[in-house]
Image (cartoon, coloured by chain):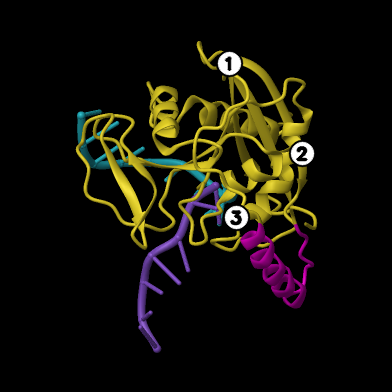
Chain colours: A yellow, B purple, C cyan
Amino acid sequence: MSSPTLHAGEDKRNAMIAVEQALALQAELAAAVIRHDAFVDPVLRVTGVDVAYAADGERIVCAAVTLDADTLAPIEIATAWGTADFPYVPGLFSFRELPIVLKALEQLRQPPQLVVCDGQGIAHPRRFGLASHLGVVCDLPTIGCAKNRLIGTHDPLKDERGSIALLVDADETIGAVLRTQDGVRPIYASIGHRIALDSACGWILRLARDYRLPETTRAADHAVRMALKEIEGPPS
DNA sequence: GCGACAG
DNA sequence: ATCTTGTCGC
């Protein structure tokens, strides 16, 4: 196969061409997604990734934070700067953020064992959201944990933490809607790659014991904001 | 034709 | 995602 990511020029014509290529590449890579637990090592560390955009609308930064899978204490953090070379198109989101995510993950001295992404896994029109794209490209177990729904329908769920409802699209279960805190808006979990949905939900629920979002996402989000502050609002 | 639409 | 202050609610 060709390169796992693409570039899109500034003008709309090149952007449209890139979108066409992305759709073809997406179909090719989506076929490689493994939907069951396939870990090569016991999971001792869990890594969270998040991307933030600078106010100038040009630069973007990604933070990858690895936590001790048992204590959830931070073990290592890495950041990477870059630019958004692909437009934001719902359904092609991974082509916009994956490049910078890969760059950040490469900075980690300890290789990731399980990655939790800020976005969908297979809960996607073509079953290939950011988490799945990252998983297939890096051949890593990944979980998609989004704050909002992209597609799919589900039954209403109870208000208590731990309540769950399956996300369904075209008669296929593509993920789960999880209430991680009592009376708090649920999150959308789906498998990215090499993990089963129930395992993914188990991880998310444990990582989100005290807050709505998993600690991996919170840690990465915090790190990414810190990085932004260093160039945006330098203490003068 | 009219919405919906991860970050 | 980001631009942004105060403010309603637990």
Q: Is residue A11 magenta?
A: yes
Residue at 63% across / 28% down in the picture?
A223
Residue A229 screen position, x and y as percent: 67, 33
Circle 3 SS class: loop
Inter-mark Cα distance, 2 to 3: 24 Å
Q: Pointer 1: what residue? A: A44
> How many other residues sit within 10 Å of disc 1, few (<14), some (14-19) or many (≥20)?
few
Query: What chain letter is assigned to the residue under label 3?
Result: A
Quadrant of image for the C terminus of chain A: top right
Inter-mark Cα distance, 3 to 1: 28 Å
Q: Pointer 3: what residue? A: A31
Circle 1 SS class: loop
Circle 2 SS class: helix
Residue type pointed to by label 1? Leu
Q: Earlier in the sequence, mark 2 or mark 3?
A: 3
Asked which quadrant contains residue A181, the reply is top left
Residue type pointed to by label 2? Lys
Labels 2 and 1 positioned on one and the same chain: yes
Mark linked to residue A180:
none
Q: In this orientation, which residue lies closer to the viewer: A124 or A73? A: A124
For the magenta stretch, what is the residue range? A6-28
Q: Does A79 sit left or right of A169 as displayed?
A: right
Q: Pointer 2: what residue? A: A103
